[in-house]
Amino acid sequence: MSHSVHSHPQLDVQIERKFVPKAKDLGPDVSWAQINKDVLRSLEKPRPAFWIIFFSALALFSFGVYCEVYQYQNGMGVADLNNPQVWGLYIATFIFWIGMGHSGTLLSALLHIIHADWRKPIYRYSEAMTTFTLLTAALFVMVHLGRVWQFYYVVAYPNERWVWPNFTSPLVWDATAIGTYLTSSLLFLYMGMIPDLAICRDNARGARRALYKFLSLGWQGTDRQWGNFKVAYMTMACFLMPLAVSVHSIVSTDFAVSQNPGWHVTSFPPYFVLGALYSGCSGIITLFIVLRYVFRFEAYMTQPILNKLIKMTFAIAMVWTYLDLIEYATTWYGSDEVAKADLVYRATGDYALQFWGMIFCAMVMPFTLLIRYVRHNYTVLLIISLILNLGMWLERFQIITPTFAKSHYPWTWTSHWWPSWVQWGMVAGSFGWFTMLFMLYCKIFPSVSMYEVKEMVHEQNLEGKLAQPVSEHAHEAGLPEGGQA
Amino acid sequence: MSLSNLIQNWQMFRTRRPYEDQYKDAPYKWAMVIDLDTCIGCNACTVACYAENNLAVVGKERFGKGQAMHWIRIERYWGEGEEMKTDFPERGAQYLPMLCQQCEAAPCEPVCPVGATHHSADGLNTQVYNRCVGSRYCSANCPYKVRYFNWWNYPERAWPNPLELQLNPDVTVRSKGVMEKCTFCMQRLRAGMDKAKTDGRILADGEVLTACAQACPTSAITFGNLADKKSKVARMWKKQQVDLAKNVQDKTEEGIRGYRVLEELNTYPSIVYLERLRNFAA
C-alpha cells in the first residue's frame, strides 16, 4: 500500500478509498524502549514454567545419558538391534532431528533474502532451534556407531598412514554436509545476535556483562558497523540457503543410493527436504507457543505472525503430502515388484499402525490448521503442532523399519522387530537434550531479535504515516539510512 | 596424509566392476559352486566355520533375537505353492547354505564411510576390522544380509577361560562394535598363496579349501580359483554358462541349473548355486 502511495502520488485518493486496515504484525503501542525491556527481562525472570520445562528436560537427558553409558559398556546388543534391523530408532530419529533444523534456516535466511519482515520476531529462536537440532542429530550419529570412540575415522583428518575416508559413501557426504551446516548455522546465529549482545552488554553486570562484552566484539552501532553487518549477514544468508537444501538431500541419499525396496526412490531428495521443512515449521509453532508463554513475549509473537507461520506450514505440508503420494504412486505403477511388495507390507504388515498413524498425523491433521478456532487457541495449536511432528517422526520410522523387515532376501522376513527400552530411552533423552540446550540458550541469549523488531516497528509506523494522505516529501524525509532491512 | 595418494587411487572409485576379462592376468580369483541338490542341510559347514573362524556362540536367547554370528548359515525353506504342499513333509525342507557372496559389484563396498570393506586383488570382499567404526551401513545395504555385527563384547562372553584356548591363532578375534563376515577362509588362502609364491608357482586346484567346503560330507561346496581355467570351479562355471562379468546367463544348453542369488540386483556374486532337482511325478 505504501508503495502504491509513494510511486503514484497522483492516485492517492483512489487508493485511500479502498484502504482496509489489515492486522499489523505488531501492536501499535510497542516502543523501542519497551522492546529492550521485555527482551532483557526474558533473560532475568521467566515464568516458573521455564524451570519446570528445564528440569524435566534435564531429567530426560539424564536418562538418555544412562542409556548411552549402559549401551557403551555392554555393546549395541542392549538396543535389541539385529541382523536385518541394523539401524532402528537411532537413524530414524537422526533424520527427524536433522529435518527439524531446516525451517530455522528457512525463516532466518530465505525469508530474510526475500524481505518477509514478519519473520523478524521469531527467526532468532528458529535459528537457535536449527543449531541445537543439528547438535542433537549429531548425537545420534555417535550413539549409533558400534565403535563411537573411532568416530573421527569418518572425517578426512590428517594422519600419517595416508588413510582417507571413502568418498563414495553417503555417510561421508553426511558428515561433511552436517558439519558444514552446523558450523555455518552456528556462525549465522551468532552473527545475527551481535547487535543484541551489545544491548545486553550495556544492561548487564557481573559475569554476564563480561560474557556479553566478549561476544559482542566491541559493537558500537556506528554506521560503518551497520553497513558491514548488513552485507555480511546477507552474504551468510545467501550461502546458507542452498546449504540447507543440500544437507537433507544428502541425508536422503543415504537411502536413495541403496538398492533396498522403499529406499531406491529418485524423488527422495525433494521429499526429504520438504519433510524437513514441514517438521521444522511444526517445531517452530510449538516453540512459538512455549516461548510466548514462558518468556511473556505476547507483544512480539502475535496472532498475525502466527497466522503467517501456519499458512506456510500448511503449504509445505501439502507439498510434502504430494511428494509422498507421488512416491507411492511411482512405486505402485512401477515395475519393481519388490518395492511394490514392500509398499503393501508397509500399509498392511507388522508396522501398519505406524504407517497409518503417519498418514493421519502428517497428512490429515494439517487440515485442522484451516480452522480459525485452532489457529487462535494456543493449547489446541500446541497439541496439533506436536501431533504433526509425531507424524513426521513416524514417517522416518516407517522409512527405516519396514524396509529392513521385508527386504530382498526372504531369510530375514520372519523378524518381528521392536526396539528395546534403551533405544526409546535414547530418543527421549534426545528430546531432553534439545529442550535443555534450547531453554538454556533462551535464558542466556535474547531469543527475540531486538534490533530487527525495532526495524519492524519503525517501518510499521512509517507505513501508518504513509497511509495518511500526506505529501511524498514526508516519506522521503521519514526514512533514515538503515531503516530498511 | 598425502593428496597424491588420493588422486592416484581416484581411478579406483571410477572403475566399473566387473569388466570383461578382469582376472585374465591375475593369478587368483576365488569362487564357489554350491550344489543344492547334494546339500542335505547337516550344518557341518556352519560348525566348521565356527571352529575355523573363531565365531562367537551367542546362546539361545540372542540367537532368537537375530544376533547370531554364523558366517555361513543353512536356510530352510518350505514353499508355498501347491506342488510344495505335496512336497512337505515327505521330503522335508529345502536347504540353502548362504554365506557372503563375495560380489564383484558389492553393494556393501561403496557405502562404507571409512573404507573398511573393500575389494581385494584376488576378488574377495574383505573387511578390515581395525578400520571399522560400526556404522552398519554395509549390512543395511547387503541384499543377502550376510554381514554380522558384534552386538556384544564376545571375546569376554563367548570364550570364558579356558575356552579361549580353542581359538584359531591365525584368525583375529573381533571386538565389540565391528562388522564381520565370511572371508572365504582368508587365513588359509593367504598361507597357501605365500607358500606357493615361495615355491614360484600358483596354488594348485584343491590345494587350499575353505573350512565349509572341506567339512561338507556330500561335497556340495566346490571352492577354487576361477582365474585358473582348468580348475574345477572354472569348469563348472563354464558348464553352467555363468560369466562373472555378465548379469544374464546365456542358458542355451539343456539342463542348466546354475544361477546366482538375486542376480537381478547386478551384484555379480562369486558363488553359483545349482538348483535342486525335483521329481514331482514320483
Image (cartoon, rainbow, N blue to C red):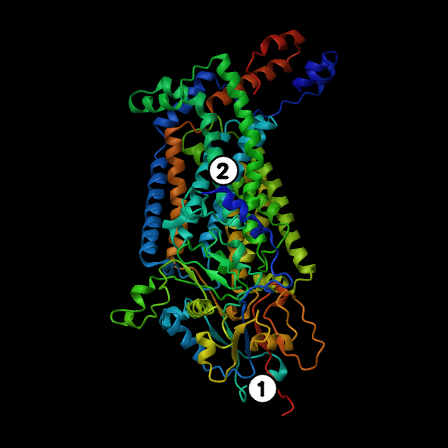
Residue A18's mark?
none
Q: Is residue A162 left or right of residue B248?
A: left
Q: Quadrant of residue A311?
A: top right
Residue A304 appearing in the image: no
In the image, A202 versus A242, the foreground residue is: A242
Q: Chain of mark 2?
A: A
In space, the residues marked 1 and 2 are separated at their CA atoms by 60 Å
In the image, A232 versus A351, the foreground residue is: A232
In the image, B51 versus A90, the foreground residue is: B51
Q: Quadrant of the C terminus of chain A?
A: top right
In the rendered structure, which amino acid carries the disc numbered 1? Asp
Q: Nearer the viewer, mark 1 or mark 2?
A: 2
In the rendered structure, which amino acid carries the disc numbered 2? Thr
Q: Which residue is mark 2?
A: A180
Q: Chain of mark 1?
A: B
In percent of width and height, residue A256 lies at 59, 53
Residue A6 appearing in the image: yes
Q: Which residue is mark 1?
A: B87
Question: Against B247, is A41 above or below?
Answer: above
